[in-house]
Amino acid sequence: MKSTRKGLRDGDLIKDTYERLNCAACEMVLKKKTDSAEVFSVRTCPECGSEFKDLR
């Protein structure tokens, strides 16, 4: 699982006009899953299922 930063650098993710993260392959907005025990949240593409870590 890549981080969102690495996904943007590699071209796997793109930002739209409203600064939302989109999957480059499907052009779908990523959904966010959070777990209170983790430091990061997981962003997933609803179409292809790709997952990215969102470190904050």
Image (cartoon, grey):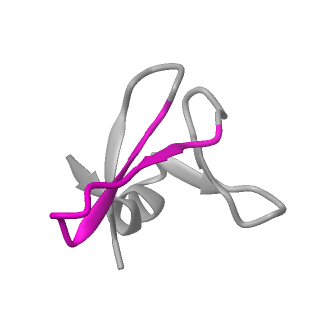
Q: Residue at x 35, y 55 (%)?
A: 34
Residue 36 horizontal side relative to residue 49, left or right: left
Query: Residue 50's spot in the image, x, y percent?
Result: 36, 32
Q: Residue at x 67, y 58 (%)?
A: 20
Residue at the limit of the structure toward the right, as seen here: 17
Tell me the quadrant of the picture where the C terminus can be found: bottom left
Residue at the limit of the structure toward the bottom, as seen here: 56
Residue 53 lies in quadrant: bottom left
Residue 55 lies in quadrant: bottom left
Query: In the figure, 47 relative to 5: above or below?
Result: above
**Segment tinted magenta in the rendering:** 29-45
Query: Residue 46's spot in the image, x, y percent?
Result: 52, 25
Is 12 magenta? The answer is no
Query: Residue 27's spot in the image, x, y percent?
Result: 66, 34
Q: Residue at x 48, y 52 (%)?
A: 11
Query: Residue 52's spot in the image, x, y percent?
Result: 33, 49
Of residue 18 and residue 5, the one placed in the foreground of this image is 18
Is 35 magenta? The answer is yes
Of residue 44 and residue 9, the one placed in the foreground of this image is 44
Residue 32 horizontal side relative to residue 39, left or right: right
Residue at the limit of the structure toward the left, as seen here: 37
Q: Residue at x 84, y 61 (%)?
A: 17
Query: In the figure, 50 relative to 43: above or below?
Result: above
Q: How many marks?
A: 0
Residue at the limit of the structure toward the front, as seen here: 36
